[in-house]
Amino acid sequence: MTQWQDYISIKKSKQARRYSLRLNHKLRRIDLVVPHRSSETRALAFAAQYQDWIEDKIAALPCAIPFAQGETIPLFDIPHRINIQYEEARKSTKITLQNGIIHVITNQTDPSLRIERYLKKYAKDVLTTMVHEKAMLLGKRVNQVNIRDTSSRWGSCSCEGNIALSWRLMFAPIETTDYVIAHEVAHLKHLDHSPKFWKLCESLSDDYKIGKKWIKDQGHTLMRYGTAI
């Protein structure tokens, strides 16, 4: 039986002056940050005081959805089922999307990393197109679009016109993805969160309030996809 201690990952930090517990949605664990000279015994004794909190947080995590045979995942609001065909003689893995199916032909017993790599490229293509389409509405130029795997900051825009987005936005409701992109594109004109900025967001994304609320309340659920159980 799994004990609460099994979900604890102790991280020593030279900057830490006190003990702190943080829920790691991506790795489905609790990060226990402790001062650099702290012992494991003292660290676990601190965590034991919050056993109920730890157990509640872990229990509340949404079920992981791995990139495995038969699993269904949403790609830009369209459900797709993973179908893996194993062929030992193959020299490489081939992945295609067709009619709501992610077809995987592979010689790998576990092609999950290859599926993830394919989905990241697909996300980059679609998200980049969406960014440029919205930027054109403003008459603004995007210098570069980067795709990252972040767990809380879903997008960013630099003063140089570089926009970064989480590839996991592909799993979100489309109005949420649209809002995050509108938010970052709006920063090309307003590098702040002034009333003018929010008015521009609204003009770029009809359902921006719905998308904003979802990413705030449910954004952490995007970390469930591809996570090993």
Image (cartoon, grey):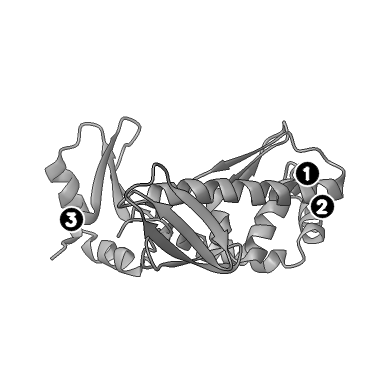
Vertical arrangement, residue 60 with respect to residue 19, above or below: below
> Nearest the camera: 30 or 122?
122
Q: Where is residue 114 in the image (x, y as percent from the top left)?
A: 43, 47
Gap between marks 3 and 2 measured at Cα? 48 Å
What residue is shown at x 30% (from left), y 60% (from top)?
Answer: 229
Mark nearest the camera among 3 and 2 is 3
> Nearest the camera: 208 or 166?
166
- Residue at which label 3 appears: 5
The three-letter code of the residue at mark 3 reads Gln
What residue is shown at x 47% (from left), y 49% (from top)?
Answer: 94
Gap between marks 1 and 2 measured at Cα? 8 Å
**Disc on the earlier residue, 3 or 1:** 3
What residue is shown at x 64% (from left), y 58% (from top)?
Answer: 177
In the drawing, what numbered circle is on residue 196?
A: 2
**Label 2 crowd (10 A; few <14 / some 14-19 / many >=20):** few
> Nearest the camera: 159 or 101?
101
In the drawing, what numbered circle is on residue 190?
A: 1
> Is the C-beta separation of discs 1 and 2 under 8 Å?
yes
**Label 1 crowd (10 A; few <14 / some 14-19 / many >=20):** some
Q: What element carries label 2?
A: helix
Q: Is mark 3 on a helix, strand or loop?
A: helix
The image quarter containing residue 195 is bottom right
Q: In this view, does 158 lie to the left or right of 52?
A: right
**Disc on the earlier residue, 1 or 2:** 1
Residue 153 seen by the camera:
no
The three-letter code of the residue at mark 1 reads His
Q: In this view, does 36 lie to the left or right of 172?
A: left
> Nearest the camera: 18 or 218?
218
Q: Is residue 207 left or right of residue 136?
A: left
Gap between marks 3 and 1 measured at Cα? 46 Å
Where's the N terminus, which quadrant? bottom left
Q: Where is residue 110 in the image (x, y as percent from the top left)?
A: 32, 52
